[in-house]
Image (cartoon, helix red, strand yellow):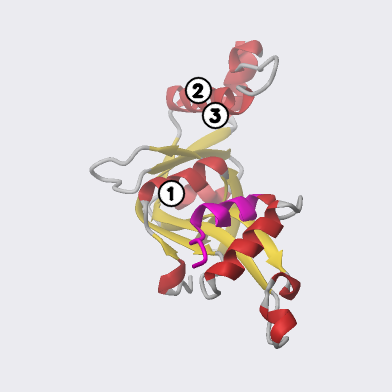
Amino acid sequence: MYNPHRFVETRLDVLHTLITQHPLGTLVTHGPDGLAADHIPFELGAPTAVAPFGVLRAHVARANPLWRLTGTQVLAIFQGPSAYISPSLFAEKAISGKVVPTWNYATVHASGTLTAIEDKEWLLAFVNRLTDRFEAPRAEPWAVEDAPRPYIDAMLSAIVGIEIPLARLDGKWKINQDDSAADRVQIAARLSAESAGVKIGALMQARSPQPE
């Protein structure tokens, strides 16, 4: 992606946090029929000697041809907070009027080689972890073992695991770095007060320099 230096984010913990908080990735592949994009919830594993940026794990329907692309390079895109930025948020609007709208966002592009996994024990352990994570906030969390085991076995037969050891992570935090510190603080504060912009506003407040 186009990523001017001022927008580049390279800190591994920051990149991992965005992926963890926004786990629904867009997985871009290139197969016999050309480009394809699938929307998949991922688990992010810790870095290893062969995966210096971590490991993405997920599962797809066996009917999805994606898993047959094992051994190919793929790209997973994770979209963090974003918001429309109105010219009315800039001090320059009242001075010269020379401002235009923009869009603030944070995103991570993760790339590596896809591997398909059909082992049922791996799949069972994976869906248990994924379920436990997303059920944890619920008052009465559902667990995989709540369903009959024959039914779960049938469901496991209908999916295939995928694993992507990450060879590269690219982060882009476009949050008004081109503008003055005063404008950035004002925009962050006003976004934080709006329901549509509260998340990107909070992200900006965490990263904005204080005006002199």
**In this rendering, does residue 165 appear at all?**
no
Residue that carries the numbered disc 2 in the rendered image: 124
Mark positioned earlier in the residue sequence (2 or 3)? 2
Mark positioned earlier in the residue sequence (3 or 1)? 1
Q: Are marks 2 and 1 in contact (CB under 8 Å)?
A: no
Q: Residue at x 44, y 50 (%)?
A: 15
Circle 3 Cα neighbour tier, 10 Å, few/some/many (<14 / 14–19 / ≥20) = some
Magenta-drawn segment: 199-212
User: Tag on residue 130?
Assistant: 3
Mark positioned earlier in the residue sequence (2 or 1)? 1
Circle 2 Cα neighbour tier, 10 Å, few/some/many (<14 / 14–19 / ≥20) = some
In this orientation, which residue lies closer to the viewer: 129 or 9? 9
Q: Residue at x 53, y 58 (%)?
A: 107
In this orientation, which residue lies closer to the viewer: 189 or 161? 189
Looking at the image, residue 137 sits to the left or right of residue 168; the answer is right
Secondary structure under tag 1 reads helix
The dominant secondary structure in magenta is helix
Seen in the picture, residue 51 relative to 122 is either above or below; the reply is below
Q: Nearer the viewer, mark 3 or mark 1?
A: 1
Whether residue 209 appears in magenta in the rendering, the answer is: yes
Amino acid type indicated by mark 3: Leu
- Calculate the distance from the C-alpha at mark 2 to the C-alpha at mark 3: 10 Å
- Calculate the distance from the C-alpha at mark 2 to the C-alpha at mark 1: 30 Å
Residue that carries the numbered disc 1 in the rendered image: 14
